[in-house]
Image: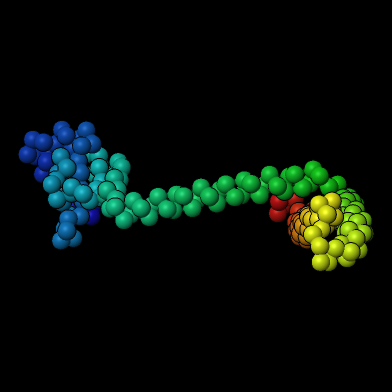
Amino acid sequence: MRTTVNLILLWLALSGVGSAAAAGQFFCCTDEHGKQVCGDILPQACYGRAYRELGSSGRTVRNIEAPLTAEQRAQRAAEDERRKEHEAALKEQKLKDQALLDTYGTEKDLETLRRRAEQDVTSSIKAAEEKIAEAQKQRKKFSDEAEFYKKKQLPASVDKGLRDADAEIEALMSVIASKKKDMEAIRIKFDEDRRRFRELTRRTPATQ
């Protein structure tokens, strides 16, 4: 290949266009038939293809890639997007890891905070259950009173008392269900925090 290029450069010099080649304005590419095509200006056969710019010594000054097809542009854009997402995920994980290490000095600290969080939720559930018990007592009171009006229209106060008690019990049951979900979320979060904390603190300086 170098011999071919040097011969072309020699021909250009002898033909009076060597000054362009000497200035580095010399281009070569492989055409559609696999043949090497060169010229002091970009040959038409090189349009839309990858080509090289060569200096007077025959060495490549730079390589120019072929224009991308629509499919290649879409593929490259997708690859760039995946790379950016990966870099963002790594950055986010690094921030989370640092926050984890800043929050917990030891695994014991982690377990202390876990128990505190679970106790808060347990206390909320217990408080809601106590309120349900009170609401049920109130409902029973109105229900017993309603027994006297089986064949009559209930007094407004009794009807309202029953509906209010039912609404309160339903709301408190929703609170308990939500708190139980919170408890599960706490379990998952602290299990993951403990796993990651152990992984980070057991790394040697060489592997961090």
For image coordinates 15% across by 61% down, the residue present is 33
For image coordinates 30% across by 41% down, the residue present is 61
Q: Is residue 15 above or below residue 104?
A: above
Q: Is residue 83 left or right of residue 206?
A: left
Q: Is residue 204 left or right of residue 134?
A: left
In the image, 167 versus 163, the foreground residue is 163
- Residue 170 in percent (x, y) is at 78, 58
Q: Is residue 25 left or right of residue 113?
A: left
Q: Is residue 14 above or below residue 160?
A: above
- Residue 78 in percent (x, y) is at 42, 53
Which quadrant of the view contains residue 18?
top left
Q: Quadrant of the N terminus?
A: bottom left
Q: How is the image coloured?
A: rainbow
- Residue 100 in percent (x, y) is at 77, 48
In the image, 118 versus 73, the foreground residue is 118
Does the rendering let one see residue 35? Answer: yes
Q: How many marks?
A: 0
For image coordinates 8% across by 35% down, the residue present is 16
